[in-house]
Amino acid sequence: MPNSTTTETTPQQADGSLSHGLKQRHLSMIALGGVIGAGLFVGSGSGIAAAGPSIVIAYALSGVLVMLVMRMLGEMSAAYPSSGSFSAHAERAIGPWAGFAAGWSFWVLLCTAVGIEGMGAAKIVHGWLPGTPQWMWVLLFMVVFCGTNLAAVKNFGEFEFWFAALKVGAISLFLILGALAIAGVLPGTDAPGTSNLSDFLPNGGDGLVIGLLASVFAYGGLETVTIAAAESQDPVRGVARAVRTAMFRVAVFYVGSMAVVVTLVPWDSKDIANQDKGPYVATLEHLGIPGAGQLMQVIILVALLSAMNANIYGASRIAFSLVERGQGPKVLARLSGGVPRIAVVTSSVLGFVCVLLNYWRPDDIFKWLLNMIGAVILVVWIFIAVSQLLLRRRIEREAPERLVVRMWAFPWLTWVALAGMAAIFVLMWREPDTRTQLYSSGGMALFLAAVGYGWQRLRAKD
């Protein structure tokens, strides 16, 4: 087998030294909240500006792909709960080099994302308090959420539960108000009909492609729930239930809110693409909702802080799992009170280094770093699909009772998902703005795969 150096473990043994303080309600909200971030509230505006009303199709297509990926990941994570999630599954299915490449690529992505989210949150607070320096707020947020993750894991779970609850409540209210406005029963509004949908593909197929690429990366974040499941009170049932409920709800939130925006507001409205407003604020202001801009800024701030909290957690657990499997410096695997605190601090510090790089070298080093992580999530999804193809047969043969969650129409839909990922790579290569990201992310993944393969060969000789 390609992973003869990997030791199979039972779900009870996997990462048994970690704490198990997360409850089912925590997992459910982590699954929902992890993907509802600033990318939806603000970043989706650029996709609408490119694709027009067809952005609904773009989000629906990418949503189907994400649901397939999460179903595959849910199947493997329910069978083998691990804080390493897809990294541990790739090692078990393909070999240590695959787990090494997938895990450390994702770790770099999460650490960089922590810094980016910190800068976004600091910009909002700086707008409220212009006399204060932005770096001070970034540092404060880093300290707060590093401290949250240094404490017992249930503290992280509680923070994420309430953060996610606020985001879910906000987007649910938005959908309700939007539906009422579309029906013409919201006071002070008239039903828009289909007037804003008449020019469905304003920029042709190229615009739809740009919107599709923007929507794919907006869905990133759902993977965190399978990382957190290993520290829940019942990992097998927890991840199975969270994945099942989250996939469809997230699709409704994303596709539904895009449909509301493009039905109520002209797609070429300058406010939609304005990064200081975004489509949600533009829609609420169009409806004459008082204080909409200020309210959404608070929601976006919460979304950014929630993402910081979740990404520090995810990065520390991925690093812990990699090191525990002999694929990194042992110091990162030291536990204190069931928490890998050195891994938490390291991940937080690297996040702050990314912030400093943005201030010191925004035009070269920081831009290069952003390009390097641009397509990492697609690399991770490919590892997930290939791992599921290989592991499913093995589980059916050796331990069929572990198949608590099953991939739909296996193996056909797994192959459909892989074909979809290949198509996205081709589309990225066609677009000048994303081609650099494709090359940079692919280069990092190949480098880490080579390092992991070398490490695997050295271990095999010992």
Image (cartoon, helix red, strand yellow):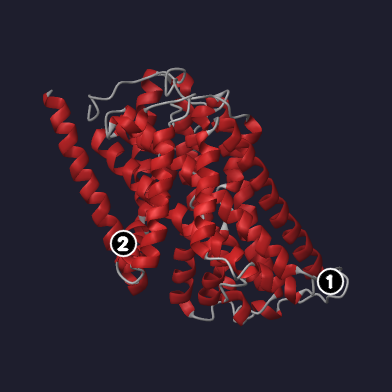
Check disc 1 and report the residue beneath it: 184
Residue 79 visible from this viewpoint? yes
Q: What residue is shown at x 34% (from left), y 64% (from top)?
A: 366
Query: Does 124 appear above or below 442?
Result: below
Choose the circle earlier in sequence order: 1 or 2: 1
Q: Secondary structure at mark 2?
A: helix
The three-letter amino acid code for the residue at tag 1 is Gly
| Residue 372 image position (x, y, % from top left) | 32, 59
Relative horizontal placement of residue 402, taking residue 323 as reference (left or right): right
Say which quadrant the C terminus sits in.
top left
Query: Does 6 appear above or below 350?
Result: above
Q: What residue is shown at x 34% (from left), y 50% (from top)?
A: 379
Number of the label disc, if any, that sits on residue 438: 2
Q: CA distance from mark 1 to mark 2?
A: 45 Å
| Residue 215 image position (x, y, % from top left) | 50, 62
Q: Residues within 10 Å of mark 1 (few under 14, many from 20)?
A: some
Question: Which one is in front, 366 or 34?
Answer: 366
Relative horizontal placement of residue 70, taking residue 165 as reference (left or right): left
Q: What residue is shown at x 78% (from left), y 63% (from top)?
A: 177
The three-letter amino acid code for the residue at tag 2 is Leu
